[in-house]
Image (cartoon, rainbow, N blue to C red):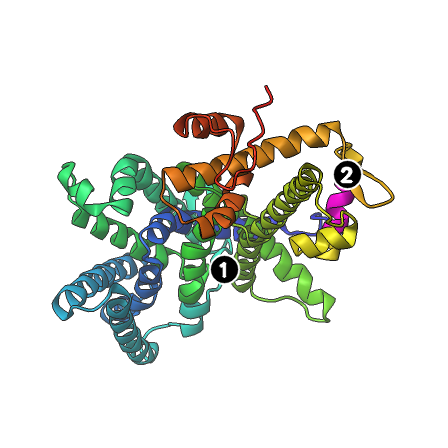
């Protein structure tokens, strides 16, 4: 493990704070881009503002913040307007219209940057890839309350505050318009106005982040933390909070990794902005794998547990039917595996579990149910046969399909549903095949 005593807080502290503010300002707006299925629009605006930046450089011949903001905001709004216009006029989907607009404007911006670079002190790599280590240096600072604060910290702090106020003040409208734009309009707030306000703030946020994470990597901060949060929760407020926390964690760990990880391979360090984006990607992978509802690994484990539970119930149901009918069926492991088409490992685990719970016992000829196992099996068989009766008498399902459908439904039937099925079918004593329906065990 490594400590943090080697960090130069007068520099590293400002770098991490710049990354945190950049991530927070982007994540606050990115949630609504993700929910609106407009993640590509954040990418489009962050690329398409380049002509605005280049125009500001060419006109003002400086890298002053205000011309940058004004140029970026203007082109950001034009990007949103052009996207909507092409989508409506050209009758193409939104993704195609965004692709047309941002690639055209981005190419124009690159051409203009090349021209601007001959006249203005402009570093294209800084715009594209970021230079957070330089941007957070104290020498380019403003005096705030008697403290010398790097200019980029002040700018990002103001943008983060503006974005936070926007989300808090218009949270209800943003929430409604993200899921139903027509409902937002009929509620008295025009969805189109909210859309353009959001796009304007995305453009401002992208420009404010140019000096820290750059034009390319700001897309990661706009999309990946909200997408990771979306994998973890279905509540919007919690999603916003989680995306902010994920962005902050990625900013801090990204800087620490940029200073530490390259040393493992014999290098001195790497770009902090790039490692921040890498950390957001790693966090997203963890969220995608371990998310409580949408996680791939969690879903896999749940499916496996469900299949084992169903197999457990199938085993006790199979043993009950053998004892009920006195059939000449083998109740040993091989016989059960053949009858239920169960894998050897899963069946071995289920049999061991049932023996440990005391629901079955091993005999010379195979396995048989204990008293508690009989109770469970009777409830399962009762559900199966009630479903068969209900499906044929109330749902009109053919006799050849009864068993397969009832076999699926029996595993998800509790006692209350059993009683409802019994009432709906006038408490039958036998199923459609003439076999007795076990009585309810209260």
User: In what element is the residue under mark 1?
Assistant: helix
Picture quadrant where residue 310 is located: top right
The CA distance from mark 2 to mark 1 is: 70 Å
Query: Which residues are the magenta region?
Result: 347-354
Is 349 magenta? The answer is: yes
- For disc 1, the marked residue is 132
x 23%, y 64%: residue: 79
Magenta span contains residue 146: no
- Identify the disc placed on residue 368: 2
**Which residue is found at the position 73% from the left and 49% from the top?**
329
Q: Is residue 245 visible?
A: no
- Count residues near mark 1 (Cα–Cα under 10 Å), then give few for <14, some for 14-19, many for 20+: many
Look at the picture and state if 61 lies above or below 80.
Answer: below
Residue 16, how many percent across, how many down? 54, 51
The image position of residue 21, as x and y in percent, is 45, 48
Q: Is residue 178 above or below residue 133?
A: above
- Residue 154 image label: none
Secondary structure beneath dot 2 equals: strand
- The answer to whether residue 174 is left or right of residue 190 is right
Image position, residue 20 (x, y; %): 49, 48
Closer to the camera in the image, 218 or 66: 218
Q: Nearer the viewer, residue 192 or 150?
A: 192
């Amino acid at each position: 493990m490594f400590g943090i005593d080697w960090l130069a807080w007068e520099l590293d502290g400002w770098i991490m704070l710049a990354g945190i503010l950049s991530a927070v300002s982007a994540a606050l707006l990115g949630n609504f881009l993700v929910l609106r299925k407009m993640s590509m629009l954040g990418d489009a605006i962050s690329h398409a503002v380049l002509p605005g930046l280049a125009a500001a450089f060419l006109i003002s011949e400086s890298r002053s913040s205000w011309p940058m903001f004004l140029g970026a905001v203007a082109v950001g709004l034009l990007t949103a307007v052009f996207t909507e216009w092409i989508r409506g006029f050209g009758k193409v989907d939104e993704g195609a219209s965004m692709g047309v607009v941002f690639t055209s404007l981005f190419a124009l911006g690159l051409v203009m940057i090349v021209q601007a670079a001959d006249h203005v002190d402009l570093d294209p790599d800084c715009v594209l890839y970021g230079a957070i280590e330089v941007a957070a240096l104290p020498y380019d600072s403003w005096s705030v309350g008697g403290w010398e604060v790097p200019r980029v910290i002040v700018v990002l702090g103001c943008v983060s505050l503006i974005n936070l106020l926007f989300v808090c003040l218009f949270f209800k409208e943003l929430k409604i318009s993200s899921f139903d734009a027509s409902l937002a309009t009929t509620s008295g707030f025009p969805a189109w106005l909210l859309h353009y306000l959001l796009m304007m703030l995305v453009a401002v946020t992208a420009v404010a982040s140019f000096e820290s994470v750059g034009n390319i990597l700001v897309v990661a901060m706009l999309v990946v933390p909200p997408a990771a949060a979306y994998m973890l929760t279905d509540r919007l407020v919690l999603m916003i909070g989680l995306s902010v926390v994920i962005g902050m964690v990625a900013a801090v760990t990204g800087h620490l990794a940029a200073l530490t990880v390259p040393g493992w391979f014999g290098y001195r360090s790497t770009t902090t902005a790039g490692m921040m984006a890498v950390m957001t990607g790693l966090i997203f992978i963890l969220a995608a794998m371990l998310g409580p509802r949408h996680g791939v690994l969690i879903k896999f484990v749940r499916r496996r547990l469900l299949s084992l539970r169903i197999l457990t119930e199938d085993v006790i149901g199979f043993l009950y039917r053998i004892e009920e009918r006195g059939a000449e069926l083998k109740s040993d492991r091989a016989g059960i595996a053949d009858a239920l088409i169960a894998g050897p490992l899963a069946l071995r685990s289920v049999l061991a579990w049932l023996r440990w719970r005391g629901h079955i016992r091993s005999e010379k000829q195979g396995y048989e149910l204990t008293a508690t196992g009989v109770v469970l099996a009777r409830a399962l068989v009762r559900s199966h046969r009630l479903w068969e009766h209900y499906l044929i008498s109330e749902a009109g399902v053919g006799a050849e399909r009864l068993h397969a459908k009832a076999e699926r439904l029996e595993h998800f039937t509790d006692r209350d549903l059993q009683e409802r099925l019994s009432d709906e079918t006038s408490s039958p004593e036998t199923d459609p095949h003439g076999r007795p329906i076990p009585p309810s065990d209260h």
